[in-house]
Image (spheres, rainbow, N blue to C red):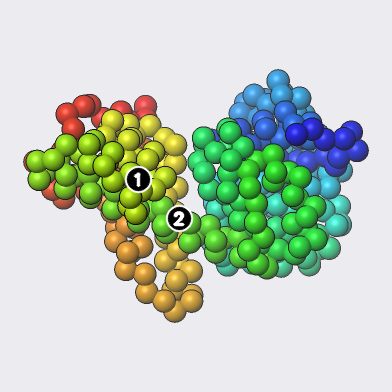
Amino acid sequence: MSYPASYPTVAFLGIGLMGRPMAARLADAGVPLHAWNRSTAKARTLATHGAQVCESVDEAVRGVAIVVSMLEAGPAVGMTMDAALPAMAPGSLWIDMSSTRHDEALAFHARLAGQGMRFLDAPVSGGVPGAQEGTLAIMAGGSLRDFEEALPLFEVLGSARLVGSAGSGQVAKLCNQLIVGATLNVVAEALLLAQAAGADPAAVREAIRGGFAGSRILELHGQRMLERNFVPGGQVKSQLKDLRNVLAAAGAAGVSLPMTAAATRSYESIEAELGGADHAAALLALERINPGVRLGSGEDRLPE
């Protein structure tokens, strides 16, 4: 997809594991792009894609109509917004594609609205492969008008759906992460049970892929577990952050989520040592409470 020369300039804030391939896709599609990252060296990698690399947040957002943020968590979004707002023009649209708490998204919306600006919370699912391939699932919360303005950008990055008013995108992402986090742990349990009970876990995975138990998690992360490949992808610390946000939202809504609580405890048990590992490391947490049982015979591949 290409864009006319009149397409508004976009400031992309946060050139990390997910932000870099997302920003690169936008720039490659012809979107005029200002790129900023706290570590400028990461942003400079986008110069070869035609992006203008900015040394500061205010330089990145000055004169642009649309700001996209893809940052670590809500506090980072808030601090970046602090730095950006004095340079932003009334009427600007801020699209936060980070994963934050629901209450944080509502606060960002209120803050921007109070200064005559607009806000979409639009977190994503699909990980680094989805960001690279333009197949992210994008869950947006905000007005229909703002969603339609952002849609040409979203179509470069994946498939987007408006799921409700401001904050609803983060609710949808939390539901997504609840399913992902719990399913990762259940897949680890199934494969470890197969191993311990004397079946071939790889063959078991193949046998159940086409049935009701088949899933993207079984497909991709089940294979990661069999290969003992824990180089990220999605990280333990990110999955744990999201699950804690799920529990916070559940508490605010007055509901109990026992499966989410169990998955959270699983990741908490390995956070200190393996926070940077792929979230398929749910297997490692499970093996630690099952001494003497180990999936396969290969060596663990972990981030350096």
The percent position of residue 80, horizontal first and vertical second, equals: 66, 48
From this view, report whether residue 299 is shown above or below residue 250. above
Toward the viewer: 144 or 42?
Answer: 144
Q: Is residue 31 left or right of residue 259?
A: right
- In what quadrant of the picture does the N terminus appear? top right
Callout 2: helix, strand or loop? helix
The percent position of residue 122, horizontal first and vertical second, equals: 64, 54
Q: Amino acid at mark 1?
A: Gly
Q: Amino acid at mark 2?
A: Gln
The percent position of residue 158, horizontal first and vertical second, equals: 63, 43
Toward the viewer: 38 or 269?
Answer: 269
Identify the residue at the far top of this view.
48
The percent position of residue 252, horizontal first and vertical second, equals: 48, 75
Q: Which residue is found at the position 65% from the left and 51% from the top?
A: 160
Q: Is residue 49 left or right of residue 264?
A: right
From this view, report whether residue 268 is shown above or below residue 298. below
Q: Quadrant of residue 301?
A: top left
Q: Which residue is found at the position 61% from the left and 51% from the top?
A: 138
User: Crowding near pointer 1: few (<14 within 10 Å), some, many (20+)?
Assistant: few
Residue marked by disc 2: 177
Is residue 196 in view from this perspective? Answer: yes
